[in-house]
Image (cartoon, helix red, strand yellow):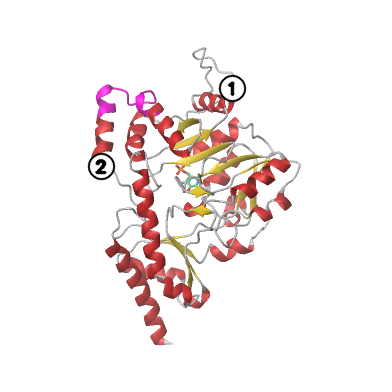
């Protein structure tokens, strides 16, 4: 089976983990944590990094550090992984959905203003499937309405918006290092910021809210959202390979785009878009099956699975999920893209031969269908 994604871990990770275990520092103190925080900050061009137990706790920590609480409203895209909406609810705040842009699948900045109220406190742009959001447009709105920006870059490590890496734009920016992300620590996450006060708040909240100057004294209710030295040991080794992973992902995307061009030219599918102001990292190379494709997405995915090719359907619209469907809202672009989109195998260790096999298998199905008609 060719997987959609798989972690690439080798000798360097093993060496670092062995070193951490031999040193006895296997919990959340140890040299790899700060090294990982510092080197990831440097990679993204930010001042401070606060490593966390996963990407969802990173989002929750960011919202808490910014003082988000009961009845606050937070703008999120209607198509994303559900952790974004959940982290808002953990704060007793309300996620307010905005449709995605049809040209690049991230939150549509031109539809944000109509959703802003007196209660709105922040926007969480999500760089979906490796594609950067239109950050300048979002920052302008945040500036005009005095809102915080929390970037969710869990799917876009190293992606660029107008030449700057994502993660550089938010008051706080959150990453995940789950097993299928661009780099992994098994489970893990990080918050980045340039604001020292926010960094300090996050460090306290991450560690049970404990006063750093007075042991076992807690001025606030915190969490245990710490990353372990073992996770960070893996992260340090992964980070050394991140540019190789990213250039391979871009190469794979190019191969797909070239070979699937005939289907796109006939408007049977849409290819993974990349707006001209951005450089995607194609976390997962994705396509949208247009209605003219003639085969349903579910049938197509089942067929590929039989041929040993794993695929993934796009996320469901947030507003369709039972905890979030309360007011029967629905959004046009999300409603179109979500049931038609799918992710293709995108692991950096795939070869050109693998991609050729995948594309040929896709074309086979469409050709057969055409002959039947
Ligand atoms: C993976 C992901 C998260 C959550 O990360 P975990 O480490 O799995 O908690 C949050 N947001 C998005 C967009 C993601 O893809």
Q: x, y (%) of residue 309?
A: 33, 64
In-image side of 112 versus 100 (left or right): right
Camera sees residue 53: no
Viewer-nearest residue: 329 or 147: 147
Q: Secondary structure at mark 2?
A: loop
On screen, residue 298 versus residue 221, left or right, reads left
Q: Is residue 43 above or below residue 276?
A: above
- Residue drawn at (51%, 28%), measured in percent from left and top? 223
Q: Which mark is residue 283?
A: none
Q: Position of residue 352 (x, y in %)?
A: 29, 62
**Residue lying at 50% horizontally and 15% vertically, measured from the top left:** 216
Q: CA–CA distance between discs 2 and 1? A: 41 Å
Q: Nearer the viewer, residue 176 or 144?
A: 144
Q: Earlier in the sequence, mark 2 or mark 1?
A: 2
Quarter of the image for the N terminus: give it. bottom left
In the rendered view, would you say 109 is above or below 344? above
Please identify the residue farthest to the top as the structure is shown. 214
Q: Which residues are magenta?
A: 19-33
Report the residue that reaches farthest toward the front.
163
- Is 354 inside the magenta-drawn segment? no
* Disc 1: residue Cβ within 8 A of ligand 1's nearest atom: no
Q: Is residue 223 above or below residue 113?
A: above
Residue situated in front as seen by the camera: 291 or 243: 243
The image quadrant that residue 88 belongs to is: top right
Q: Which residue is mark 1?
A: 220
Q: Residues within 10 Å of mark 2 (few under 14, many from 20)?
A: few
Q: Which mark is residue 10?
A: 2
- Can residue 26 be found in the magenta stretch? yes
Residue 91 appears in the picture as rendered: yes
The C terminus - image quarter: bottom left
Q: Residues within 10 Å of mark 1 (few under 14, many from 20)?
A: few
């Amino acid at each position: 089976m060719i997987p959609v994604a798989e972690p690439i871990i080798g000798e360097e990770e093993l060496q670092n983990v062995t070193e951490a275990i031999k040193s006895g520092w296997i919990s959340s103190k140890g040299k790899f944590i700060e090294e990982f925080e510092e080197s990831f900050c440097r990679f993204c061009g930010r001042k401070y990094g606060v490593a966390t137990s996963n990407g969802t706790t990173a989002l929750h920590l960011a919202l808490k550090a910014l003082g988000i609480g009961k009845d606050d409203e937070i703008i999120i895209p209607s198509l994303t992984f559900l952790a974004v909406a959940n982290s808002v609810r953990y704060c007793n705040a309300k996620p307010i959905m905005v449709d995605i842009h049809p040209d690049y699948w991230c939150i549509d900045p031109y539809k944000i203003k109509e959703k802003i109220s007196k209660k709105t406190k922040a926007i969480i742009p999500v760089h979906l499937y490796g594609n950067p959001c239109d950050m300048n447009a979002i920052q302008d709105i945040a500036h005009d309405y005095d809102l915080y920006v929390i970037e969710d870059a869990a799917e876009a490590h190293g992606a660029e918006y107008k030449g700057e890496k994502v993660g550089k734009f938010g008051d706080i920016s959150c990453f995940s290092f789950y097993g299928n992300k661009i780099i992994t620590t098994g489970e893990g996450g990080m918050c980045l910021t340039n604001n020292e006060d926010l960094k300090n708040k996050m460090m306290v909240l991450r560690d049970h809210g404990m006063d750093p100057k007075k042991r076992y004294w807690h001025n606030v209710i915190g969490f245990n959202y710490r990353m372990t030295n073992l996770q960070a040991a893996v992260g340090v080794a992964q980070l050394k390979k991140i540019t190789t992973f990213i250039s391979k992902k871009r190469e794979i995307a190019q191969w797909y785009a070239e070979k699937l061009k005939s289907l796109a030219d006939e408007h049977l599918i849409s290819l993974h878009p990349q707006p001209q102001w951005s450089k995607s990292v194609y976390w997962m190379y994705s396509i949208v099956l247009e209605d003219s494709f003639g085969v349903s997405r579910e049938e197509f995915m089942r067929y590929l699975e039989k041929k040993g090719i794993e695929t993934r359907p796009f996320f469901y619209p947030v507003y369709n999920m039972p905890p979030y469907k309360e007011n029967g809202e629905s959004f046009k672009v999300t409603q179109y893209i979500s049931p038609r989109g799918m992710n293709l195998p995108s692991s950096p260790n795939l070869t050109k031969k693998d991609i050729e096999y995948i594309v040929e298998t896709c074309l086979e199905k469409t050709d057969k269908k055409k002959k039947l008609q």
